Amino acid sequence: MTKPVSIRFQELSLDEIAAATGAVVVFVGEDGKLDRGAARVNRLARGAVARLVENAAFADLNSGDVLELAFPAGLAADGVLVVKLDRRCGHDIARKAGVNIARLKRGRPMLVLTGTHRMGDEIALGLALRCYEFTDHKTPNARPEGDVTVMGVTQPDAALDVAARAEGVFLTRDLTNAPANILTTQTFAERLLALSDLGLEVEVLDEPALEALGMRTLLAVGQGSDSPSKVVILRWNGGGDEAPFALIGKGVVFDTGGISMKPAAGMEEMTMDMGGAGVVAGVMSTLARRKAKANVVALVGLVENMPDGKAIRPGDVITTMKGDTVEIINTDAEGRMVLADVLWYAQDRFKPSGMIDLATLTGAIVIGLGHHKAGVFSNDDALCNGFLDAAKDEGEGAWRMPLDPVYEPQLKSRVADLQNVGGRPAGAVTAAQFLQRFVKAGVPWIHLDIAGVASTPSDSVYAPKGASGWGVLSIDRLIRDRYER
C-alpha cells in the first residue's frame, strides 16, 4: 500500500522556522502583504521574500502558482517556496496550490506556513494527492520522503480528514495500477478483507455461494479463467437504523475480451478494468477512516475474462439472477453482465435508499468524453444533481448522459429477452440501458462509466500518468452532503 506523505498540523511557531530543513512554504495574497509567518521568513532571509513579491515575475503568477528562492540566507532550509494565494480563494485553487507545492517537494521535508489561511486543510490535501508514485514493482529508492508540517489555523479534525481522503484515493490508485498477476480475484478479495481492520464488516461470497444465489451471468464471465469469481460485500454502519446507500463496483481484474478477443496493442492496460471496484474500495476506506455517520454497503464483483475451452461464446444464452435471459453477442461486453447480477442482489438483500454503480464499461464513453469526464447516467434527477454538484466541488469531471426508452430496440434479441450489446451507435448509452433493466422501480440509481477517467494516458491535476483515483472524493462528498446524520 502506497502511504500518503505524513502531514501533521500544529499552531504557528515562529521560533521553529529558522531551523526547519528542506523547504519552507509561505503564502502571499494579491495585495502582496506578508502574514506573520511570511514576515518572519522574510526577516530571516534578509528581505528576499519581499523583493520577490515586488518583482514582476510574482505579479504575473496565477493564483496557486509558486516561485522558489533557492538556498536562502538565514535559514537552514534549502529553499523557500512563495505561493501566490488569495485568502478568499476557493478550495479548488487551494488544492491547486498544494499540487504545485508537491511538484517542487522532491522528497524534501516541508514546513508549510498557512497561518490564518482558512484553506490550510485543502492545501494539504492537494499536496498529499500529488505526492503519489506507484513503486511497488520497482527497485527500492533509498531516498526517504520527508514529512510535511502545516503550521496554521485549521479545523480540529483536519489531519484526520485529509489523511482519510488521501488514503482512500491512494488505495484506489494502488489497486487500479496493480498488474493482474499480482492482483488476482483472490488477492483482491484479501485486500478487501484487510479493511475489516478499519471497522468495516467484510463478507466474501465464493463460487458455490454465487451459484446458489443464481448469479449466472457473473459466473459466466469468469468461467474461462482459473481465477475463481467472487463477490465481496463491505458494510459501514455509522448512521443508525436507516436503509444503507449502496455502491456497486465492476472488478474485472483482467479483460482479454474473452472469445471476442481484444487487439493485442494496448491490452496490457486492461489491468485497470477493475477500476470501478477500486473506487468502491477507496470510498469505503475513507468512510471508515473518518468515521462517517452514514450507512453504506458496497458490493464488488471480482472476475477475470479469459478465453478458454470453458469460456462463454457469442450466441450463448445466460439467465440472470433476476430471471431475464441474455444472448451473448460479444464476450467483451462482460462488465454489464457482472453488474447485472450484483445490482439485483444488492437490492434484494439490502433494500438500499439509492445506489451508484461504477465501471470501466465502454470505449464509447472515452470517444465521447475523452479522459476528462466520466459519463453519468441516472433515473433520479435529485440524486444525479447531488452527485454532479459533488463532482464539481471536488474537481472531478462528470457529464450527464441520456437514458431513454428510444434506445431499447437496439438491445432486442431474436432468441432471448435481450442481447448484451446494442451495436456501435450510442454504445455507452445502450450499456446503461442494459443495466437499468436490473434496477427496481423506485430505487434512485446512478451508473458511472469511468472508462476514460479511471486511468489516464498522461498526468492529471492530482496524479501522475496511470490510475487517477477519480470518484473517491466525489462519492465521499455526496455521502457527506446527503446521507450523513
Image (cartoon, rainbow, N blue to C red):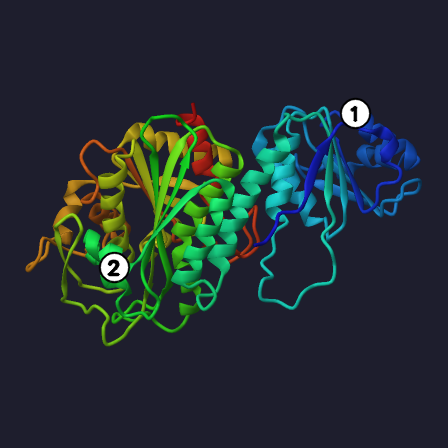
Horizontal and vertical percent position of residue 268:
43, 68
Residue 266 appears anywhere in the view: no
- Which residue is more in the foreground, 296 or 389? 296
Horizontal and vertical percent position of residue 111:
77, 39
Q: Which of marks 2 and 1 is in front?
A: 2
Please tell me which of labels 2 and 1 falls first in the chain: 1
Residue at the image position 31 percent from the left and 57 percent from the top: 206
Q: In the rendered picture of this protein, how many numbered marks are placed on residues?
A: 2
Is disc 2 placed on a helix, strand or loop? helix
Horizontal and vertical percent position of residue 195:
48, 47
- Which residue is more in the foreground, 199 or 381? 199
Residue 217's place in the image compared with 308, above or below, is above
Horizontal and vertical percent position of residue 107:
73, 53
Q: Which image quarter is the N terminus in?
A: bottom right
Quadrant in the rendering for residue 262? bottom left
Q: What residue type is labelled 2?
A: Pro
Q: Mark 1 points at which residue?
A: 33
- Which residue is more in the foreground, 45 or 148? 148
The residue positioned farthest toward the bottom in the image shown: 309
Q: Name the residue under label 2.
A: 208
Is disc 1 placed on a helix, strand or loop? loop
Residue 6's place in the image compared with 2, above or below, is above
- Which residue is more in the foreground, 276 or 319? 319
Q: What residue type is labelled 1?
A: Lys
